[in-house]
Amino acid sequence: MQVSQNYTKIPLLIAFITILPLISMGQTSSINQSENVHFGLGFGGIVTTTFPAKSNYTFKGVKTSIGFTGGGFFQYDFGRKKNWFFHGELNASFRKLNATSERAEPSDTHYISFKKQLVNISVPLGIGRRFSIGDDELFSMSVALFAVLDLPCYPRVADITIGTYDSPQNVNSVLCSGMFDVTFKYDFVSLSLRYGFDALPVINAKGFGANAGADSQKFYTGNFTFQLNFVIF
């Protein structure tokens, strides 16, 4: 199946993204002398919950699935005590989305089912503040707020059942979302806990056949991410 073969490219895609900070190291030798600039890598898991928007369909409970994420990050410290920082990333994540409406019987035409596996490329950009934990300078905690720019997802097709028809349909990528981050850091390793909610629908599934005149069905996603980050310098 063509879609399943595409996922063999995921490790190569994430590997490419994670080596970008290493390439930058060779191009920023003058910047490296500043303790305000940091580069690193991050790897972890992502828990995605699919929230169907209110419509003429009655959905079962929300669906949650686990995927993984990885990428590289850049951080610039500023402020009088260098407690504030600007943080930017380039990440790839593998996610699964799933939503199913109630169905009285197999021949029920008032029914929609949506399943999608995708590789999502995102660029989180935001500002945060760092706080010391106790007297040990190696420990710190930070909070940050990000705007996340999402590049077109891959593949851009979802498996959708509307009524009694099964048909793959194109999806609309999320262009921007928001994310809140709490990070606990020890020396050069940190644990980042994040929650983000897509501000725009991830898909518009238009009806056809007996449901051709139905309104488009929209879905949103909430994402909880747990990620280990390693500062290279």
Image: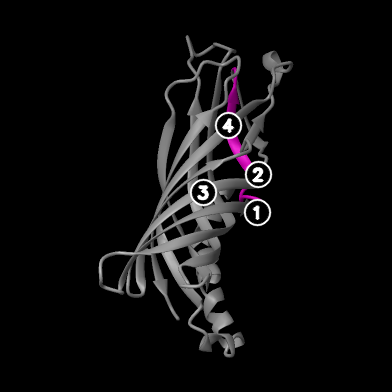
Residue type, numbered disc 4: Phe
Q: How far is mark 3 from mark 2, CA to CA? A: 17 Å
Residue indicated by mark 4: 219
Farthest residue to the right: give it: 213
Front residue of 29 and 56: 29
Residue indicated by mark 3: 179
Q: How far is mark 4 from mark 1, CA to CA? A: 18 Å
Say if the magenta span includes residue 197: no
- Residue 105, position as x, y percentages in the image: 48, 10
Residue indicated by mark 1: 151
Residue displayed at 54% across by 76% down: 21
The answer to whether marks 3 and 1 mark residues whose Cβ atoms lie closer than 8 Å is no
Say if the magenta span includes residue 154: yes
Residue type, numbered disc 3: Met
Quadrant hosting residue 9 = bottom right
Q: Viewer-nearest of labels 3 and 2?
A: 3
Front residue of 162 and 16: 16
Q: How far is mark 3 from mark 4, CA to CA? A: 18 Å
Residue type, numbered disc 1: Leu
The answer to whether marks 1 and 2 mark residues whose Cβ atoms lie closer than 8 Å is yes
Against 186, is 60 above or below? above
Q: Is residue 112 left or right of residue 187?
A: right
Front residue of 30 and 154: 30
Q: How far is mark 3 from mark 1, CA to CA? A: 16 Å
Farthest residue to the left: give it: 135
Question: Which residues are drawn in magenta?
Answer: 150-163
Residue type, numbered disc 2: Ser
